[in-house]
Image (cartoon, grey):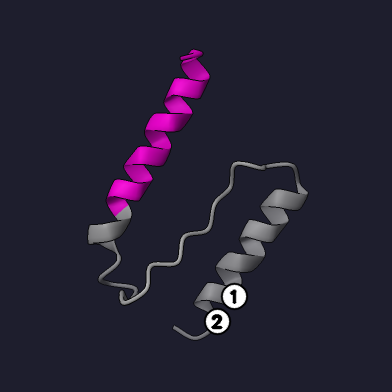
């Protein structure tokens, strides 16, 4: 998908400028849009767990 990475990089930059310093951009080499679920979901779950710990004060 042409421009997909650039759109995500722009969103990441705008989030950083808006003060959301925990925003992250991962680039998963070797995966297309449909194949990123397998390596991407564990990253997503790890991020959510970290946010929940932070919210709960752990």
Under circle 1, the secondary element is helix
Quadrant position of the N terminus in the picture? bottom left
Q: Residue furthest top?
A: 57
Identify the residue position indicated by label 1 in the image: 6
Residue 48: say if magenta.
yes
In percent of width and height, residue 12 lies at: 62, 58
Under circle 2, the secondary element is loop
Mark 2 surroundings within 10 Å by alpha-carbon count, few (fewer than 14), some (14 through 19), many (20 or more):
few
The rendered magenta stretch, by its main secondary structure, is classed as: helix
Identify the residue position indicated by label 2 in the image: 3
Q: How far apart are marks 2 and 1 (CA)?
A: 5 Å
Q: Residue at x 37, y 46 (%)?
A: 44
Q: Residue furthest bottom?
A: 2
Tags 2 and 1 in contact by the CB under 8 Å rule?
yes
Mark drawn on residue 21? none
Residues rendered magenta in the picture: 41-58
């Amino acid at each position: 998908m042409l421009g997909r990475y650039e759109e995500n990089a722009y969103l990441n930059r705008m989030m950083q400028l808006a003060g959301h310093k925990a925003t992250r951009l991962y680039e998963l080499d070797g995966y297309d849009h449909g194949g990123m679920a397998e390596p991407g979901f564990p990253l997503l779950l790890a991020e959510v767990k970290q946010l929940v710990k932070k919210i709960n004060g752990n």
